[in-house]
Image: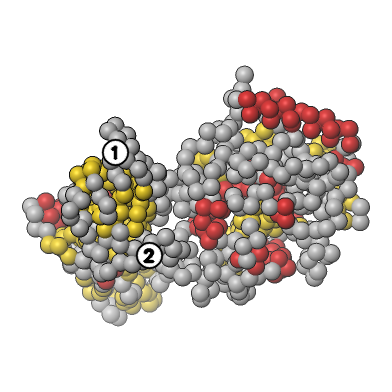
Amino acid sequence: MPRKLRMLLAAAGVVALTAATAGASTTSVTITSPRAGQSISLKKNPYLAIAGGATFAPTTAGTTRLYLRRDGCGTSNDNPHLSIATGTDGGDGCGLIFNAVVGTGGDVDQGAFVDFPSSDGMPLALSTAGPITGQVSLTGAQVGLAYVDVTLEALINGEAVTLGKATGSATLDPTGDYTPVPFSIQPSSTLDGSDLQALDLRVLVHGPNVYSGFVSLNGHSFADLPSHAASVNESVQVSLDDSSFANAVPARLSGSSWSVALQTPAALGKHTIYARSAQGFDTSATASQTFTVTK
Amino acid sequence: MKKRVAHLVGALVILMAVSLIGSGAALAADPTHHPLYMPNANNIHNPALQPPPVCCVPVAPPVAGEPAPVNMAYFGGHVQVTPKVYLVFWGWGQAGAFDHTTPGMPAYDPDGAAARMTAFIQAMGGSNWAEVSTQYYETVGGTNVYIQNPTNVLGGVWYDDTNPIHDNVSGLELAQEAQRAVAHFGVTDLKNSQFVIAQPQKYNEAGFDGGVGYCAWHDYTQPQYYPGVQPGISFTNMPYSLNMGQSCGQNSVNTGYYAGKLDGFTIVLGHEVEETITDPGAEDVINGQNLGGWYDYSAYENGDKCAWVGYTFGTTSPSTVPGGLNNITGNDGKQYPVQSLWSNNSAAGAGYCAGAGDDLPTG
């Protein structure tokens, strides 16, 4: 099974750090049987063998890095978001919490989480071969132990799905520019191959001795998602005499070939077969072939 | 607990005061007409958004986050005994209706709001939430005919991209669209039908756009208020709730960024739909005849009295107030966030907000 093979490859560590965008994938389909204008005897062929070829974008396993970005701090246009592109952020060092030291055993937590929803890089073909890892870097007048709670939520088939939660911690270094706080989330294997429509990273900083918990951006905070370069959900649909595919039937895919058997239409004369392939949310142009049914 | 007891006592006192005034049907409404607004969570006190009081009892503004006490009365108009809700997505497929797309979602519904509202209306029939309204009735020939809770209340869905919409549409234009919907669906039973004119992200009703402070409103077409429009149409102005974020309910029940993103749509839509079922005539008094169904002496309908109960603006947390915003289970087994509805029968007849699965404890 190609999908299983891809998972094994990913698990073996064949992971290239890429900023893959599944949305750039393309797919196409052809019909090789019946041939154009072919005559088919209804008596001899109660079932019609239909076949063709299909191409899909490579589904190479890799990792997609999504950076935490923020356009401003304390304005109506802060726009915290995730992006596959990094750069200088106007909201670098924006504070999540600002509180006095509460001492040992205390935990400063204003409940002021910040959502970073994806602004690009979607759809994304998720792989669960490995954990989602990343770091939220803290900066500012940092001192003491800090915790960073992260929650990853995705939109899959129009439904909200929590990929997982994690808490990372680090002892902040007041002499450094920033201190990375790593996190790791292992999504459920049932989500393997899911096409993520959108993603949100929720960040909450807290800790017993945190005077200020400012998130360092400018490429210092990110999440790495094991993913495929294109969706692993590949299919071909076939429709007889109906270009709307209202009652399409799925074809059997085998590598770059597909096939399906349909009942030969009882009505004698010309008929048209329509086929189209899909890879995730991408759908190919429709291919068609006309044939003639004889007695 | 003390607060709740105080409420109940207060409700009883005010109830007695109302009974001294006389029956609801005998009261005259303020002639100044405006639609019945659902204030957003930040404008629950806004005097401009309150319904005109029915009569002479001084009305204290509702307390934010708490039910507005005293029971509702029947004012003599019709109710929707076998309700049918028609959803009109006006201009959702029109160019410029949205400023974003989402992979795998239709361009005419990138946030899934239309799909969510449609699913909600399909799923609300037969629910415990909708059951609350079955205690209310209309009186026909001396007989009380009670509202029913049928499984299927979705009358139809129309994506109208033929009649152009624009930003800052007026109430009259919404009424005209409702009239077009009546024709589109071929509806003849107007009394049991209501039309929700849902607007896309970038084209909304002027008052909503202008920050008047409401999330939606419902009304009833009469020549005095909607000249040129077929009389007797119950319709809802349903702007794009998400534009107002948390003040119109985003993430008010469900915590996740996406899990709670559409919370406001079903909370607001549910409010308007159930108000229209129990008061399709929208408190209109025409030539001395009261067309209104059920509301209290302050003119609060079953939705108004329970709006934003248990909600602290901007905070998603399980409501600890009975009757607070909550998820209900629809007839499809899925969860939908709603507000509760006023039930005269609750609290041993003193009335309370009910139906959202977090009712007052009994016994």
In the rendered structure, are the residues bearing label 2 and label 1 in contact, judged by CB atoms less than 8 Å apart?
no
Which residue occupies the foreground of this view, B169 or B129?
A: B169
Which amino acid does the dot numbered 2 rest on? Gly
Which residue occupies the foreground of this view, B135 or B340?
A: B340
Above or below, B50 relative to A245: above
Q: Residue B339: give x, y in percent of width and height.
A: 59, 43
Does residue A280 appear in the picture of this structure? no
Q: Is residue B254 left or right of residue B173?
A: left
Q: Is residue B193 left or right of residue A206?
A: right
Which residue occupies the foreground of this view, B185 or B235?
A: B235
Which residue occupies the foreground of this view, B111 or A92?
A: A92
Q: Which residue is mark 2?
A: A72
Q: Quadrant of the C terminus of chain A?
A: bottom left
Chain ID at mark 2: A
Secondary element type, mark 2: loop
Q: Residue B253: give x, y in percent of width and height.
A: 49, 44
Residue A208's disc number: 1
Residue plotted at (27% across, 55% down)? A140
| Res B148 → quadrant | top right
Does residue B361 appear in the picture of this structure? yes
| Res B164 → quadrant | bottom right
Chain ID at mark 1: A
Residue plotted at (27% across, 61% down)? A217
Q: How many angstroms separate mark 2 from mark 1 (CA)?
A: 27 Å
Q: How many numbered markers are drawn?
A: 2
Q: Nearer the viewer, mark 2 or mark 1?
A: 1
| Res B71 → quadrant | top right
Residue plotted at (40% across, 43% down)? A110
Name which of mark 2 and mark 1 comes first in the sequence. 2
Q: Is residue B167 left or right of residue A172?
A: right
Residue plotted at (76% across, 38% down)? B72
Secondary element type, mark 1: loop
